[in-house]
Amino acid sequence: MSNYKKLITLINRKQAKVCVVGLGYVGLPIAIEFAYKGFFVYGFDTKESRVQRLKKGISYIDDISDKDVKKAIGKKLYPTCCVSDLSKADVIIICVPTPLRKRKVPNISYIIKASNSIRNHLRKGQLIVLESTTYPGTTRDVILPILQKGGLKEAADFFLSFSPERIDPGNKKYPFAKIPKVVGGISKEATALTKTLYSKVIDKVVTVSSAETAEIVKLLENTFRIVNIGLINEFAMVCNKFRIDVWEVVKATKTKPFGFMPFYPGPGLGGHCIPTDPLYLSWKARKLGFKTKMIDLAAKTNLFMPYYVAQRAEELLQLKGRDIDKARILVLGVTYKKDVKDLRESPALDIIGLLKDKGSRVSYSDPYIPYLDINSICMKNTKITQAGLKKYDLVILTTDHKKFNYKPIAKNAKLIFDTRNAFEKAGIKSAHIIKL
């Protein structure tokens, strides 16, 4: 029996052992879902602290509860730091970070490191799936040569494919199993195996013609978002010049039943996808002699938003006769997204830094972040009180957590700059609440 037939039989019977490499916001939900669906899962991570917490039934991700972890371990999840466990798995799913370097160029060092570890333990009959977002060609041009260095050949001895992660932290409506999965293999055998694998845990699996196509699907998804967010952020700045409420404009425009999809302005982009993924595409395009003008302009516009917020804050204080270098400012919400404990690329951190550079005495309040020690910012969370709010010259809402009690904040704050339209959504309107 061929390696392909042996492996697809194991997958169909749920006897294939799965190893998820990287137990972060993407990897841990995937590992838990496969365990729930009856597969034995090695959850591999180089951070021993993560593995030890999981073994104790403790989660470190908002979307995964301690109960979820204990249930998965009670089934078939085995957290491990032992790299030799890679050889025991029939399927290896790579979910490692792909950040940008300081000059906004891709950093695929984690992918390369994971691929080298897999190569050292690669055996016949294994399926390797990359989920980490990257530029087109990474699976074929980077991972494949590494894996084939030992003499084994793709499609004959092992199988390699790409399937973009689509996990949205904090989204209860669309958990991992409910989001359609796109898969594209180096070979047709790899595509078929990957489709069969994910079909066991996900409602819908879509195949594409190649790994490169699957890679660029993810980039289009987030390019669509970065461009439209950049557009609405620029539109918000234009509306401010005209003294027009951009939120009212969007509300009225979206009544059109076709040809328009609402996007909303904000203080900047955050998270692990939108600020990063499209720049992987623009970097690779430049290597091929093509300049992605729309992506680059949208990225530039969105990167400017924290500066714009700080600039508006200074102008608002001046209108009240207060210099920014003497002002006390409270920033509400520092995570990149509402109701999520995640600081990755959060624009609130940039805003705090910019305000501090201007001489302001800045504090923050966020129910999910007890302290900040990041990007030269070191401070403790401030508890919101009636008396405390009255001490600040300006309150800037940067992340609209549901846990904030907006009515007493609006009642006791002297001046509010709302970058998310949270107060109006809570039914609160006042002359001292200024919207982005």
Image: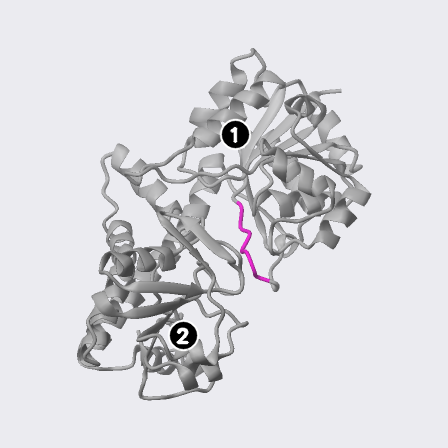
| Residue at the spot 30% in from the left edge and 42% down from the top edge | 282
Q: Secondary structure at mark 2?
A: loop
Sequence-first tag of 1 and 2: 1
Residue 147 inside the magenta-drawn segment: no
Q: Percent x, y for residue 58?
A: 69, 48
Using the rendered image of the protein, determine whether residue 282 is visible from the camera's viewpoint. Answer: yes
Residue position marked by numbered label 1 in the rendering: 186
* Classed neighbour count for the residue bearing mark 2: other residues with Cα under 10 Å, few (<14), some (14–19), many (≥20): few
2 left or right of 399 in image: right
Q: Percent x, y for residue 234?
A: 25, 66
Q: Quadrant of the N terminus?
A: top right
102 left or right of 61 in image: left
Q: Relative to 93, is 4 above or below?
A: above
Way the structure is coloured: one colour
| Residue at the spot 72% in from the left edge and 48% down from the top edge | 69
Q: Percent x, y for residue 174?
A: 60, 60
Residue position marked by numbered label 2 in the rendering: 258
Q: Relative to 336, is 136 above or below?
A: above
The span shown in magenta is 165-171
Q: Main secondary structure of the magenta part?
A: loop
Amino acid beneath label 1: Ile
The one of 291 and 398 positioned closer to us in this rendering: 398
The one of 280 and 254 positioned closer to us in this rendering: 280
